[in-house]
Amino acid sequence: MAAPRERPDAALLRQLAGDSPVLAVDSLVAGYGAMEILHGVSLYVARGQSLCLIGPNGAGKSTLLHAVYGFARIHAGTIRLNGEDVTHLRPAQRLRRAGLAYVLQDSSVFPDMTVEENLLMGGYLMRRRADAREAAAGICSQYPALARRRGQRASVLSGGERRLLEIARALMMEPSVLLVDEPSIGLEPRFVGMVFELLSELQHARGKTIVLVEQNARKGLEFADIGYVLVAGELAMAGPAAELRSDPEVGRVFLGGI
């Protein structure tokens, strides 16, 4: 970033979340093994809000999602979801008890399984197989593109259909918060809009809270309510996404000029 500016404090971050965050990350220090990648990062987002993380490669954006979900090692700080301290819960516990789901950046579809079998993998924590099948049927009824392919192998899906399946699978356990890592990565432009329309419907029609990392900073900030800029494992900027999108500094560094 060019000229140094005052880093956003917790009061501003809470204000952006309407002072009632459903997900509250406080002073998180995290990484992998002994390697520390995040240096005291805080994040607050309210129920039904969306927050987009942007920043250069290696800034710690995906690591922040990993830490929130339980994939990274937490050295200090706390993570609260719906008021519950989930800092040291395993990912399966965060999904089952706190309603936190994660859509991975890399293609996580099982190509040799059918669409329905892929969906059922999202219900692996359900106690009864019948409940998982009922949930999969409900999701197929919502997304005709998946219903048409229900019995086909996932390997035949287009890039957009695969991303739809990944998001739909994350919905199997009815999470309240979705972590979405690079939803547009690897997609043809014609599918990018479709994916963001789906995320918008989940937020505005179904009340999901969405935290996403997005390489296409302009698209991510157009979608989100709140924007955070991470640099070198620290929070450098935060504000309403529309304001960040029109900020000359953000535009110069991340949006190719304004």
Image (cartoon, rainbow, N blue to C red):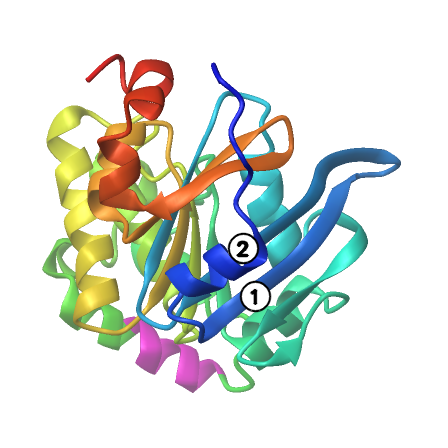
Q: Residue at x 65, y 73 (%)?
A: 93
The percent coordinates of residue 236 (x first, y second) are: 53, 34
Is residue 215 shown to the viewer in this render? yes
- Nearer to me, 42 or 105: 42
The quadrant holding residue 31 is: top right
As displayed, is residue 218 above or below residue 170? above
Please name the amino acid that badge 1 sits on.
Ala
- Nearer to me, 160 or 151: 160
Please name the amino acid that badge 2 sits on.
Leu
Position of residue 179 in the picture relative to residue 245 (left or right): right
Q: Are marks 2 and 1 in contact (CB under 8 Å)?
A: yes
Position of residue 243 in the picture relative to residue 147 (left or right): right
The quadrant holding residue 184 is: top left
The percent coordinates of residue 64 (x first, y second) are: 60, 45
Q: Residue at x 47, y 56 (%)?
A: 12
Q: Quadrant of the C terminus?
A: top left
Q: Element type at marker 2?
A: strand
The percent coordinates of residue 75 (x first, y second) are: 83, 50
In the image, the segment drawn in magenta is 129-136
- Residue 217 is inside the magenta segment: no
Q: Element type at marker 1?
A: strand
The quadrant holding residue 111 is: top left
- Nearer to me, 232 or 122: 232
As displayed, is residue 257 above or below residue 165? above
Q: Residue at x 56, y 71 (%)?
A: 95
- Marks 2 and 1, how far apart in space? 6 Å
Task: Determine crowd level at label 2: few under 14, some 14-19, many 20+ residues with C-alpha closer than 10 A.
Answer: many
Instruction: Check residue 123 in the rendering and tell me which mark sits there, or answer none.
Output: none
Q: Earlier in the sequence, mark 2 or mark 1?
A: 1
Q: Badge 1 is on which residue?
A: 24
Instruction: Check residue 43 in the rendering and tell me which mark sits there, or answer none.
Output: 2
Task: Determine crowd level at label 1: few under 14, some 14-19, many 20+ residues with C-alpha closer than 10 A.
Answer: many
